[in-house]
Amino acid sequence: MSALRSWIARRLLLGAVQTAAVVLLVFALTEALPGDAAVAFAGDQPDPERIAAVREAMGLDRPAHERLADWVTGLLHGDFGTSLTSGRPVSGFLADGFVPTLILATLTVLLLVPVGVGLGVLAARHEGRFTDRLISSATLGVYAVPEFALGVLLMSVFALRLGWLPPTAVGYGTGLLEHPSVLVLPVLVLLARPVCSLARLVRAGMIEALAAPYTAHAERYGVSGARIRYTHALPNALAPATQQLARTIDWLLCGVIVVEALYVIPGLGTVLMNAVADRDIPVVQGLAVVFGLATVVLNLGADLVTHRLAPRSEVAA
């Protein structure tokens, strides 16, 4: 038990260090952005006095370390800052875009696990046969298609040509669950590549586990094939798959930006794109920190689950 507690303490400490690194990196990158935000906000052909006033209002006339200290202090108190363009708190922008993004990500993950694991197990059960070759070829082919290209293709076929689904979320507001047809194409795009990678990883893990000595030993003792597959082999195959699932959710945070832009969904991705276009640095910083913290937390959770499924696995170490 003490070894487990020590391992958990090390992972939590690593997570804290990673969180601090994320905050510093976000601030450094936004500081390194080209151009002068004060000039951009001062309007066309501004005079030097106007630029100086804007710089003072934005706090850009203060040293970087002072602005970093104030920003970190605000983050520790849950204050992400104030938008430069609207004067609204950044937390308000996060709240506006959180629900649509959460809906997309949740639906994708809920479908990803059973579909990806199911395809991987099915392919492993029929290793080398037609079903295995079909699943492997299909997953490889779909994985090779970029999200934006797949989204345009699905929109062209199912929305514009066949008219079965709405092409975008324009006119539906943030009540996406009240109009489930709007979510079909975005979720399919977000689901396509993660399902392929998860299925191929589960297939490889299942084949390796079924070829292990303990599997043959269990067969000699008369243990049923279904029990061997789902009680012994599948947990070992899911240990590395859990890590892949965490990385997939990380990818969703990036992929959702493309999907929300393509299908005009008012989520965090759209908020981020608008903030970048407007050079609204506090909003960009706030969203980047949220995405970074989500990545750290998800990977910590994946390590804990992996350690639970396969305590001796080097993946968890």
Image (spheres, rainbow, N blue to C red):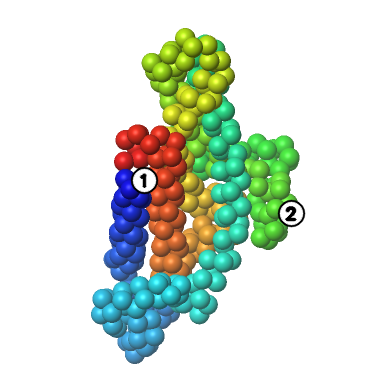
Which of the pair 205/195 is nearer the observer?
205
**Could you give the CA–CA distance between mark 2 and mark 1, rounded to whole angstroms?**
48 Å
Which of the pair 73/146 is nearer the observer?
73
Q: Is residue 313 above or below residue 183?
A: above
Q: Earlier in the sequence, mark 2 or mark 1?
A: 1
Question: In the image, what residue occupies the spot 56% across and 15% down?
Answer: 224
Q: Where is residue 263 in the image (x, y as percent from the top left)?
A: 60, 51
Of the residues shown, which amino acid type is indicated by label 2? Answer: Glu
Q: Can residue 295 be seen in this view?
A: no
Q: Which of marks 2 and 1 is in front?
A: 1
What kind of element bears circle 2?
helix
Q: Where is residue 103 in the image (x, y as percent from the top left)?
A: 61, 52
In this view, the residue farthest toward the front is: 1
Q: Residues within 10 Å of mark 2 (few under 14, many from 20)?
A: few
Q: In which quarter of the image is the C terminus?
A: top left
* Image quadrant assignment for residue 243: top left
Numbered label tally: 2
Q: Residues within 10 Å of mark 1 (few under 14, many from 20)?
A: few
Q: In which quarter of the image is the N terminus?
A: top left
Q: Position of residue 137 (x, y in %)?
A: 49, 21
Q: Is residue 216 visible?
A: yes
Horizontal side of 130 relative to 295 (left or right) equals: right
What residue is pinned by disc 1? 1
Of the residues shown, which amino acid type is indicated by label 1? Answer: Met
